[in-house]
Amino acid sequence: MRLGIRLQLLAALGALLGLAFVPLFFAVASLTSASMTQARELSARALGRAVAAHLATARATRPPAELEPLIASYLGQGGVAAIAVLDASGNRSTSLGNAAALKAIPPGIAPGAEEIRAVRTSHGAALLLIVPSAEPEPGSVAVVIRTDAEPAAPLVRLVALYTGVMALSLLVFAYFSLTRLIVRPIDELSRAAGRVAAGARSLEVPRGGARELGELGESLSRMMAKLRADEEALRTKIAEIERYAADLKSAQQRLIRSERLASVGRLSAGLAHEIGNPIAAILGFQDLLLEGGLDPREQRDFLERMKRETERIHHVLRDLLDFARPPVREAGGRPGIVEVAVRDALSLVKPQKSARGIEISAEIEPSLPEVTLPPEGLVQVLLNLLLNAIDELGLADVKPGRILVRAHQTKPEGMVRLEVLDNGRGLANEVRDTLFEPFVTTKEVGRGTGLGLAVCRGLVESAGGSIFASDRPEGGARFVVDLPVAEIP
Ligand SMILES: Nc1ncnc2c1ncn2[C@@H]1O[C@H](COP(=O)(O)OP(=O)(O)OP(=O)(O)O)[C@@H](O)[C@H]1O
Ligand SMILES: [Mg+2]
């Protein structure tokens, strides 16, 4: 758990003052206690000497019977706990006082020099004072004065009270000053930042407190203003980008529209050309026939020519229909077997006169899966590609012309890839981008309508596949057909 700044401040100040004042208290208390004990010992010594001197005199002048009441009168005064009058051999002649204190006087004290000993009785610390006396006979007086009473205790309590009050007031003072200087401005800054986070537009700088915190607030406020300006600039940029994106989109749509119009234009132009020419020819023959005056042989010749032109129109229209309505893949329709289709297509193409002198070979990966394009479609696509390659090799006059049909399964897509490669001149630049559109051809009238590849694309795409063409690095063209594998029913 994380404590608030106030609690942490309080704990730190408390620990600091504790560290400073507790040793100070113990030092002062022990000093006071020591000096009090010293003073007590001094006074005990003076008292003991006076009592001993007085008793020594009394011993010399009074009979021993009077000594006892005199001794008794001293007991209890200034801590005097026991008094013993000792003869020359150290035996007690008279002794009175507290039993525990009397025990502290050792037997057999020989008279000699004055002696002071610190002793312990069962009641506490005491001083034993032995004062020698010479008259009327040598001996000594022993006085036990208690020093264990705690004269320093009230003073020590006073010192404790003083240091306690001092520490507490310092703590309160430091706490309130630090709160006013640091904690409150930080609180204000934090609240202001919270308001900014909630959406306020400006940061209020705390007025009171330490100068550094004021400066921090000013810096934050400046940073906010900069952020606001940046945000504004960003908004403007985003609006600009949105405008550009909209412009781009409408331009793209215009482009698509015009491209569509262009395709329609190309389609109609091709159609007009491919159908218009035979129709014009037919019309010409009809005029000649209607004029009459032709012999039967000529009439037959014209009719045969009209038939050929009509067949040409029919052929174009059939191809166009194939392109416009490629056979729809029926659910559960027959899948195509690439190996069989390649064999069929090659057996149709190889006997052609135009294929003579061309080496046609095939490399088919064994156990290829069946594809989604039905067998007739597959043969038609292969035929169109093979006939194009044969046309190209004938036109390019390459010796020897070579055509390779390849098929394998691609990894990791798992499609069946069919390739037709030749060693002709490659794709002509003017048709490279529009190869698969209808009526795009480089061949002269009567030799090509430009529908072959358009039909291929229609068939392949209707089977969920794709077709593309490229030049081979070693020369020639490469047509690639990718077909999905048919699902096993
Ligand atoms: N193997 C190839 N090498 C070079 N160019 C090719 C090849 N195959 C096709 N082309 C180019 O693509 C054009 C379009 O071919 P596509 O099969 O669509 O029409 P076409 O062969 O001209 O006429 P159609 O097939 O309708 O009789 C061709 O005219 C030719 O320029
Ligand atoms: Mg063709």
Image (spheres, rainbow, N blue to C red):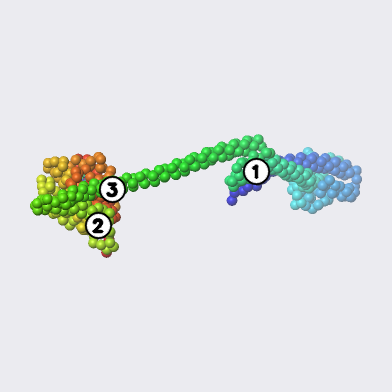
Q: Earlier in the sequence, mark 3 or mark 2?
A: 3
The label shown at residue 373 is: 2
Under circle 3, the secondary element is helix
Name the residue rendered at 78%, 50% in the picture: 101
Q: Earlier in the sequence, mark 1 or mark 3?
A: 1
Q: Amino acid at mark 1?
A: Glu
Choose mark 1 or mark 2, whichever is in front: 2
Name the residue rendered at 16%, 46% in the picture: 390
Choose mark 1 or mark 3, whichever is in front: 3
Q: Is residue 376 visible?
A: yes
Quadrant of residue 37 within the rendered picture: top right
Q: Amino acid at mark 2?
A: Leu
Ligand 1 within 8 Å of the CB at mark 3: no
Q: Callout 3: few (<14), some (14-19), or many (20+) C-alpha neighbours within 10 Å?
A: some
The label shown at residue 188 is: 1
Q: Amino acid at mark 3?
A: Ser
Q: Earlier in the sequence, mark 1 or mark 2?
A: 1
Q: How many marks?
A: 3
Find residue 70 and report its horizontal and vertical position in percent: 89, 48
Find residue 451 and report its horizontal and vertical position in percent: 23, 49
Screen quadrant of the C terminus: bottom left
Q: Which residue is mark 3?
A: 268
Marks 1 and 2 close (CB-CB < 8 Å):
no
Q: Callout 2: few (<14), some (14-19), or many (20+) C-alpha neighbours within 10 Å?
A: many
Under circle 2, the secondary element is loop
